[in-house]
Amino acid sequence: METTIDPKVIQQAAERLRGAATSGKPVAPVRDLISAGGVDAAYAVQEVNTRHYLGNGRRLVGRKIGLTSLAVQRQLGVDQPDYGMLFADMDVPEGIPISLNQVIQPKVEAEIAIVIGRDLPHPDLTTAEMIRAVEYVVPAIEIVDSRVANWDIRIWDTVADNASSGLFVLGAVPRKLDGLDLRECGMVMEIKGEPISVGAGIACLGSPITASLWLARVMARVGRPLLEGDVILSGALGPMAGVNRGDVVEARINGVGTVRAEFAADGN
Amino acid sequence: MDKLARYAETLDRAALDARATPQLTHGDPDLSVADAYLIQKLSVDRRLARGERRIGVKMGLTSRAKMLQVGVDEVAWGRLTDAMLIEEGAAMSRARFVHPRVEPEVAFLMKAPLSGRVTAAQALAAVEAIAPAMEIIDSRYENFKFTLTDVIADNTSSSGLVIGQWNDPATDCSNLGVILEINGQVTQIGSTAAILGHPLRSLVAAARLVAEAGEEITAGDIVMAGGITAAPNLAPGQTVRTTIQGLGSVMFRVEV
């Protein structure tokens, strides 16, 4: 990413966020360092950490799309979504309890995950090409997290912080896209059996396909194109919710399926 | 005139004149929920005495969004009359209301009576059809502010309804996507799961609550299951449409 901010400052912001991820102790926002450079500077911070993690052997397995709801975009004063990297170690198999020690200040969102069946190198990818590239969809619970204390984030902070990504749980029953209505499908997310968040596919930028198309084009443009087998967490279908020790979170997406995330009751 | 009848007249007048009235609980803070349901009945009886016909019941405060908006956590019910019907695709007059808002809903058409404690299966067996719908809610109180007691007395803010196409009740209605558009802009998004987790639960609750009042849901009744999203304000010039996944859409226009 081209940015007007001194590379040393970009490095400093990246190290601050990485330090929080390592220690589990949240840090001050980084916007004071980078906001003059705009969102490009924030992506430059994210990229520094992506390179660092890849160099340390973490494996890139997909992307998440954030800020796909118009309400959230307005809240952050932006007019487009953002993206972050998904690494293999962020995947939590369904049924395995999630320890709160793995995260700092987790929240959960219900999403549709799209698994790509072919490489998408074209920055001018079309809707038809995007649809053809969908190998299957599964329901997902994204455990979003922030390395920034008290979620005190503006757009620069969340972009720099890998789009506030944390962990994710994918449902285990893949569905073909054929005949699925990803726009009108209803979503309900329950925590301990209580409906906490409801929504529909349209909340995700009009459709998870539209959101994925945006992502695929951007990723091709910035030189990190989506590849066969990559997972796209396409964006929340309803409001996010906080979680606590012992919570069981279940998301049901009509036609797409059901997925559960369980949080360990003890401190481990 | 008895106090409750006087309150009923006040609320009925407020609706007729489309003019807000102070909350009953401001002058009478000890009013009970039981009193409020009596006031509601007396107020709707005045409508029936003028020739309006009872067509069913509505459930209120059934969604989390609604409960947050109103600040309560209890389900309530109200009475529907034919004068509240707005023709699907037609226009409603803004001037007839105090400060109307709209919310997407699911409507049940009953083919058999339903009363007292029933199971979800019994409730479903009494349903003839299910439709996408919208309710116009219009508190007769100033600034749309009320306590639970106030809103029950005010027929749970009910003032209009519009019903779309009827569908097979075997449709699984537990988690259908809901989209409310105003002038083509997506304004609210939700799921029918917002209605107590499943709209049939609202029908079960309706059977129980209506029976507690000594009445019953009868064949031919419409039961509005409850709001699904927050309720945006209505203004002249708007075209309002609700689409429910698999059930189709329903619309009306707002005129001066």
Image (spheres, grey):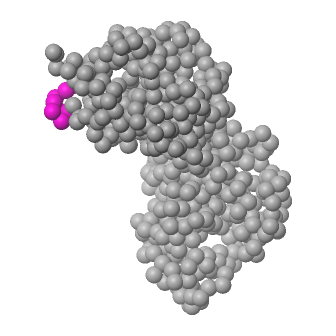
List x then y, in percent, for residue A197.
50, 45
Is residue B31 located in the magenta-colored stretch of the structure?
Answer: yes
Q: Is residue B47 visible to us here?
A: yes
Q: Which residues are magenta?
A: B25-33
Please say if B126 is above or below B226.
Answer: above
Image quadrant assignment for residue B180: top right
Please say if B206 is above or below B114.
Answer: below
Determine the residue positioned at 59% across, 88% down. Answer: A4
Image quadrant assignment for residue A123: bottom right
Determine the residue positioned at 77% across, 48% down. Answer: A136
Determine the residue positioned at 47% across, 69% down. Answer: A153
List x then y, in percent, for residue A98.
54, 53
Determine the residue positioned at 38% across, 43% down. Answer: B68
List x then y, in percent, for residue A17.
52, 75
Is residue A247 located in the magenta-colored stretch of the structure?
Answer: no
Query: In what quadrant of the picture does the N terminus of chain A appear?
Result: bottom right
A230 or A223, which is in the foreground?
A: A223
Position of residue B2 in the picture relative to residue B98 (left or right):
left
